[in-house]
Image (cartoon, helix red, strand yellow):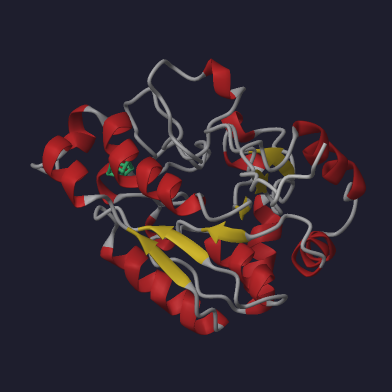
Amino acid sequence: MAEPARRIDVLRTGPRFTAEQAEALNARFAGVPTIAMLRAVLREGLAGDLAAVSSFGAESAVLLHLIASIDRSVPVLFLDTGKHFPETLAYRDTVMKRLGMPNLVNLTPNADALAARDESGLRWSYDPDGCCEIRKVQPLAAALTHFDATITGRKGFQSGTRAGLQRFEIDRTDAAGRLKINPLADWTGDQIAAYFAATGLPAHPLVEQGYPSIGCSPCTSKVAPGEDPRSGRWRGWDKTECGIHVDGAAEELPPGYDPAF
Ligand code: SF4
């Protein structure tokens, strides 16, 4: 039988990474210092095309400093929700300039989605999940179609829901099989503080005002000494994450919930 005149192009539609590959990476880097792990990931291209996702919150500068010490060109994605404290926007610019990272990507909500679902800008007050979907989940989903992996600053100590966090995991918010890398997964609060002290990195100006975890202004409140650091986020709501970090298998997501990342 004659060979076809040309090969048929094949679109890669399967997941980029599997849970087994994530586990293999966890095993390979078990006990390896964070900076060495990150250097291997970035220099050996272990995770394909990747971007850092940063909230420019209380501890974000540590992760970005580690990345910048290896590769300043890594894109930094920021969810510019339109609801941030002005101090956060100023801090974002200060940190990026200080680290010499040129590739800041501000992800803004779709104007049509805002007009249709949050014209008043008050959706956060009666439907924070819906507000986060428009202002965070959807813009990030659109941006992440271009990437194989993301680097996040999440840490296990931040809350009960993040305890036991792995360095490498599969992003379960869609079926793309994107790798999510959490270099600071096992860092403690003391280590974060020591890193700030050793590097002289600037602190987010709201930290000293009693905000150990900083998100959008309407959904962030001060935290009393001894409280869970993230307890000031969506206080009064049964909500602990904004939807860009979803645990569990993708098929367990609620019907109709189809965010990416
Ligand atoms: S954190 Fe609050 S204001 Fe920000 S997107 Fe979510 S619900 Fe809206």
Residue 121 visible here: yes
Residue that lies at the very extreme toward the left in this rendered image: 120
Q: Position of residue 46 (x, y in %)?
A: 79, 57
- Is residue 230 depicted above or below 151 in this figure? above
Q: Is residue 90 left or right of residue 53?
A: left
Residue at the location (58% across, 28% down)?
A: 247
Q: Is residue 237 left or right of residue 48?
A: left
Image quarter for residue 50? bottom right
Location of ligand 1 given as a quarter of the image: top left
Q: Position of residue 234 (x, y in %)?
A: 34, 35
- Is residue 106 depicted above or below 93 in this figure? above
Total label count? 0
Q: Nearer the viewer, residue 172 or 182?
A: 172
Image quarter for residue 170? top right
Residue at the location (61% across, 38% down)?
A: 13
Residue 222 visible here: no
In the picture, the quarter occupied by the N terminus is top right
Residue at the location (42% across, 62% down)?
A: 208
